[in-house]
Amino acid sequence: MPAMNHPYPTPEPVDAVVLISADAEWRPVRERFAGLPPLATPYGEAIAATLPGRGPDRRVVFFHGGWGKIAAAASTQYAIDRWRPPLLVNLGTCGGFAGDIAAGEVLLVDFTLVYDILEQMGDPDEALAHYATELDLSWLRGPLPLPARRELLISADRDIVAGEIPDLRGRFGAIAADWESGAIAHVAARNGTRCLILRAVTDLVDHEREDGEAYGRPELFAARTESVMARLLDSLPGWLAMGEESTD
């Protein structure tokens, strides 16, 4: 998937594009940078901001790409074409499997897998492998800016189904799932763009109870999303500094 010439060239180079998927994840970003004018895109708003940190300030574009695999893949390609970032960061949330992870924990994603592909004419494992992506995190050296578990994250265009958790654990070793990471990582890899995905667990789904603690309780998801997004945003300058140090 080669990068295309885009009709909207960026006037200045950026250090990173930070891709935000769900509406609930974008709201804390929009509130934090309320004094900056948003830029309209075919997907969602974009906000250009300057972040202080160790060394020079960093020029970052926060981009609301949209929820689900379709929007995630398209907006990832759009971000790469338009801003040509040396680093694409995805900050967001995920659901965890009760007993395997706790609410509030952060995943540093090193492998993504799209698990809702159902191939019945050929080899189903080959179909899953086509979109599986390993993320190169060798550039992350030293103490992490935020406590995080380095883990695989699986994605699908649906919330976690409690009854499927034993199979997802057994087949993939999964402990959490989201909607967009698999698409974002795949498109970034096809473009040769360095990608960092950090997802915090907002809610747990319990196989034994056959329910999720946020199912039917969107206010719980919204409140926890606001909390974890604040932590992820606070840690962002540290992650960006690690990326710059790896190229020195």
Image (cartoon, grey):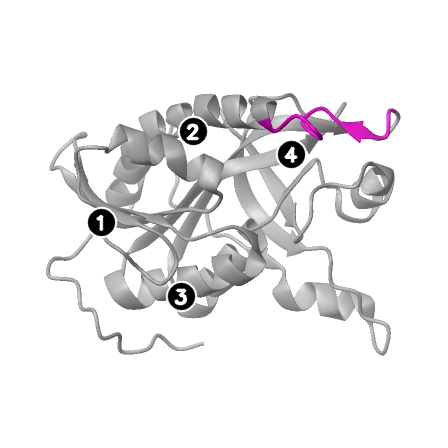
Amino acid identity at mark 2: Met
N-terminal of the pair, mark 1 or mark 3, is: 1
Residue drawn at point x = 19 percent, y = 30 percent: 53
* Residue 217 in magenta stretch: yes
The label on residue 77 is: 3
The kind of secondary structure element at disc 1 is loop
The kind of secondary structure element at disc 4 is strand
Q: Is residue 122 above or below residue 8?
A: below
The kind of secondary structure element at disc 3 is helix
Amino acid identity at mark 3: Gln
Name the quadrant containing residue 160. top right
The label on residue 15 is: 1
**Could you tell me how far apart the alpha carbons at marks 1 and 3 are, in whole angstroms?**
17 Å
The label on residue 229 is: 2
**Could you tell me how far apart the alpha carbons at marks 2 and 3 are, in whole angstroms?**
23 Å
**Could you tell me how far apart the alpha carbons at marks 3 and 4 are, in whole angstroms?**
25 Å
Q: Mark 4 points at which residue?
A: 95
Q: Are marks 1 and 3 in contact (CB under 8 Å)?
A: no
